[in-house]
Amino acid sequence: MRPAVSTIWDWLAEVPDPEIPVISLTDLGIIRDVEWQGETLVVTVTPTYSGCPATAVINLDIENHLLSKGVEHVMLRRQLTPAWTTDWITDQGRDKLRDYGIAPPIDGTAPDGDVMARVTSLTGRGNMAVPCPRCNSNDTRRVSQFGSTPCKASWVCNACLEPFDYFKCH
């Protein structure tokens, strides 16, 4: 007997993101659909961005985890449209990021096509307030648009003096 789709979702919630192991792939929101097509389990995955270097590892981790649970035939479907957005990160995932020391994305701050907003974002002028995940102070500043992975930026808290990553919106 094949497992129920709800069980498969529970199993996928056990698969950590390879770059941020405290958050699961379902918390990250990249698992878009799970369905049985005959005897094959089809899992639809939307990468955080099309060039994400972790995509191959994520796919291998999904397949290996499902095979370890007894699913014999797994097919991974890559879905690029609609593009992944940080809005898909669950509230639980945002809490896990914060507890791990990464500031979760701030809703409404993703680039929206406004060229001047992007220039301001890249130059650092007009920094938004990103709460420190350690002390919750808003007295923070961006050090670099580029952090430990392409999806994060480097910030520092002026109150507790701790550096931290901010998970950029997109």
Image (tube, rainbow, N blue to C red):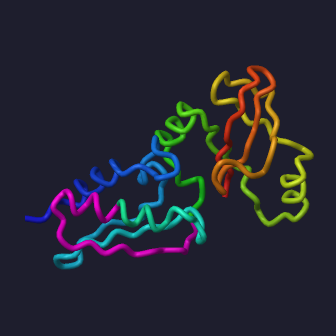
Q: Which residues are the magenta region? A: 62-83
| Residue 167 vertical placement versus 2 (above, below) | above
Q: How many marks?
A: 0
Confirm whether the magenta stretch covers residue 150: no
| Image location of residue 133, percent across then percent down | 64, 30
Viewed as shown, does residue 59 lie left or right of 82?
left
| Residue 125 vertical placement versus 78 (above, below) | above
| Image location of residue 7, percent across then percent down | 22, 54
Residue at 22% of width from left, 76% of height from top?
40
Residue at 33% of width from left, 54% of height from top?
12
Viewed as shown, does residue 11 lie left or right of 47?
left
| Image location of residue 170, percent across then percent down | 66, 58
Residue 69 figure quarter: bottom left
Which image quarter is the N terminus in?
Answer: bottom left
Task: Return the residue found at the far bottom.
Answer: 38
Q: Nearer the viewer, residue 57 or 166?
A: 57
| Image location of residue 141, percent across then percent down | 82, 36
Residue at 85% of width from left, 42% of height from top?
127
Residue at 54% of width from left, 34% of height from top?
100
